Amino acid sequence: MAVTEVKPYLYYEGADAALDWMEQVLGFGPATRWRNADGVTEEAEIVAGGSRIAVCGRAADPGNGGGLLLIVHVDDVDAQYQRVRAAVDIDVEPPADQPYGPRTFTVTDPWGYQWNFWQGEATPPPE
C-alpha cells in the first residue's frame, strides 16, 4: 500500500458561497460541485494550483478535530483498512464505494481528527 496524496477537506455551511469566494478572491478554480435534488451543494472540489481542496456543504462538527477531514489517497484502500484494524482496536466501518466515485473509509484519531482513505478519483457529476 502506498500513499499517493493528502487533500484537505473543509466544512462550509453554504458551500456555494465559500467556493464562489475562493474563486473570486483567492483565484482558485474551477470548482466541481455535486448537488442534491434541491440544488444544494453537498460535496465539491476546487483546484488550487496543482492541488485540490475538497469541500463539504455542511457545518463542521465541533467534535471533529475542529472540522477538518484529511483525505489520504492510497493505491489499495482495503489493504489500508486491514492495516488500521490490525494496529488498533477501534470500531472502524469497512471501505465503501461512494456515489461520487472513490472507495473510502474513515478513522478518527485520539485527538478527534478524521483520516479518510480514498482509492480512486471523484467522477464529475452529470450535466
Image (spheres, grey):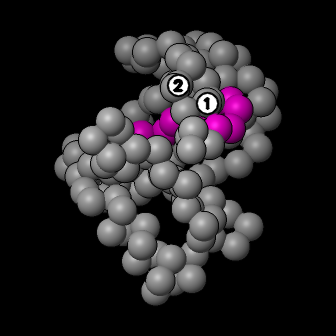
The crowd level at tag 1 (other Cα within 10 Å; few <14, some 14-19, many 20+) is: some
| Rendered position, 99 above or below 63 | above
Find residue 98 and name its label: 2
SS of the residue at dot 1? loop
Q: Which residues are magenta?
A: 113-123
State the residue lying farthest toward the left.
62
Looking at this view, is 11 or 27 the one in front? 27
Q: Residue drawn at (25%, 57%), measured in percent from left and top?
A: 13
Q: Residue drawn at (46%, 86%), measured in percent from left and top?
A: 25
Percent position (x, y) of residue 37? 32, 36
> Quarter of the image containing the N terminus?
top right
The answer to whether the residues at label 1 and label 2 have Cβ atoms under 8 Å apart is yes
Instruction: Tell me the quarter of the picture where residue 73 sits.
Output: top right
Percent position (x, y) of residue 38? 27, 41
**Residue labelled with disc 1:** 101
Q: Residue drawn at (79%, 34%), measured in percent from left and top?
A: 2
> Quarter of the image containing the C terminus?
top right
SS of the residue at dot 2? loop
| Rendered position, 91 above or below 57 | above
